Amino acid sequence: MRSHTMRLAGPPEKVFPLLCPVREFEWIESWACEMVFSRSGVAELDCVFQTDFADDGPQDTWVISRYEPPERLEFVRINAVRAMRYAITLSREGDSHTRAEWKQVLTGLNVEGEKVLKALTPENISAIRERTIIGGFVGSLVANDSSSAMVVAELAEYGINVD
């Protein structure tokens, strides 16, 4: 299991709705997905969507397996070589911050999948996190809507400063 905790600017009620395949277009510059199933058109229990990123292996199918706004969200993400379960827990810190705990359980489904998992070093994971989460927050939301933006408070850990 891999885990990471972040302190985000904004209460859970503002942060949680952004953890949605549709809303991620707003803050992850390179985000692309195809919605397969959603009654509401956005994130909800049993929502299914697909992603296909060249640097992330074969096409993934994601299923939202737990949806408890504004505190808990879980995805099962599977492709031909590996399966992942993402568990995201949000908790309030003071009046205006959120503690976000991300847990990831990865399973290789075959020899190729085991190779992919072995290649996921802490450095690779940090680079991916910086490129998607941090880069997306800083690059779009901070510039466009600071009142609802999830600004990562630990940017210094990644060598990024926001003025």
Image (tube, grey):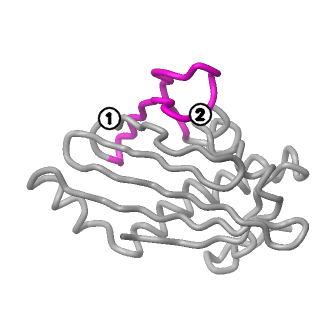
Would you say 107 lies left or right of 132 here? left
User: In the image, which residues are magenta?
Assistant: 31-56
Question: What is the quadrant of the N terminus in the image?
Answer: bottom left
Relative to residue 38, is residue 9 drawn left or right?
Answer: right
Residue 33 falls inside the magenta stretch: yes
Closest to the camera, between mark 1 and mark 2, is 2
Q: Residue at x 75, y 72 (%)?
A: 153
Residue at mark 1: 59
- Between residues 100 and 155, which one lies in front from this camera angle? 100
For the point 43% across and 37% down, the residue is 63
Residue 59 spot, x, y in % from top left? 32, 35
Name the element at disc 2. loop
Q: Give yes or no for residue 106 being in the magenta stretch.
A: no
Q: Dots 1 and 2: beta carbons under 8 Å? A: no
- For mark 2, what is the residue? 44
**Residue type pointed to by label 1:** Gln
- Residue 72, how many percent across, how many down? 61, 54
Q: Earlier in the sequence, mark 1 or mark 2?
A: 2
Report crowding for label 1: few under 14, some 14 to 19, many 20 or more residues within 10 A (C-alpha).
some
Residue 156, percent across and down?
Answer: 69, 79
Question: Residue 145 has which mark?
Answer: none
* Separation of marks 1 and 2 at Cα, in angstroms: 21 Å
